[in-house]
Amino acid sequence: MESGFILWSINVGFGMVFLSVALALLRLAKGPPLPDRVVALDMMTVAIVAFCGLAAVRSSEPAFLDVALVLALVGFLATVALARFAERRTIRQETGKDDDE
Amino acid sequence: MSLFIAAILVLIGSALTVLAGIGIMRLPDVFIRMHAATKVGTLGSGMIMAGTAVFFGDNDVVIRCVLSVFFLLLTAPIGAHMIGRAALRTGVKPWTAADAKAGKQQEESA
């Protein structure tokens, strides 16, 4: 009975994480400005980390947790790079030169 | 018993994750949406990783789960801070009480 319950809850969890990634993807497509898209991308990374945990339980294969670990680190780099890009693009448009200090 | 606890943790975590998704769709402004994305999303992911750790109950698996949650908790506030600063500097107008009274969402004004 217990293993049936965990299988059911893993399936429900997969559905909910799918839904959450789909909603974030809608926000990513809709915008409106660039920072909104970066927030949606960040949120998708966090949801995919959760997805990796669920996949590890579902297949009883702990190797998926390495994917989650790496994704938690790399997603942060993507967020920081995009935020810096958005910020420096406006500075460049306003002053006509690169502000790099 | 540990399977039961793992299932409950996974259910709570996935409910929080879907709440984060709804929040990122429904909230009016990028600064408010950031709360849904970083706080609720991180808590949901952490709950699901905790459920995974309880399910396996193995030493190296638990260490990997704890490390990934630790990195999420370490990086989410920094990322959110940088996005918020970039949004404010690129001229996104924060959503105010006056907009709330007018029933206006950011999409309509921007």
Image (cartoon, coloured by chain):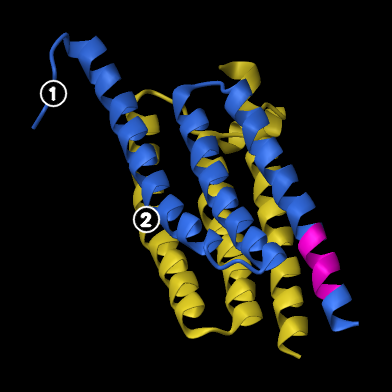
Chain colours: A blue, B yellow
| Residue at the image point whose x is 17% and y is 12% from the top | A95
- Identify the residue shown where x is 25% and y is 11%: A93
Q: Check if residue A7 falls in the magenta segment.
A: yes
Name the chain under label 2.
B
Q: Which residues are magenta?
A: A5-11
Q: Nearer the viewer, residue B99 or B72?
A: B72
Give the x, y percent position of residue B1. 76, 91
Type of secondary structure dominating the magenta stretch:
helix
- Left or right: where does residue B104 sit relative to residue B73? right
A18 over A6 or under it: above or below: above
- Say which amino acid is labelled 2: Thr
Chain ID of residue with mark 1: A
In this view, the residue farthest toward the right is: A1
Residue beneath the point at 55% across and 67% down: B46
Q: Is residue B32 above or below residue B15?
A: above
Q: Secondary structure at mark 2?
A: helix
Rendered residue at 60%/62% (across/down): A53
Q: Secondary structure at mark 1?
A: loop
Q: Which residue is mark 2?
A: B75
CA gap between label 1 and label 2 equals 25 Å
Q: Which residue is mark 1?
A: A99
Percent coordinates x, y for residue A16 in the rendering: 76, 52
Q: Nearer the viewer, residue A28 or A5?
A: A5
Q: In the picture shown, does residue A38 fall above or below B20? A: above
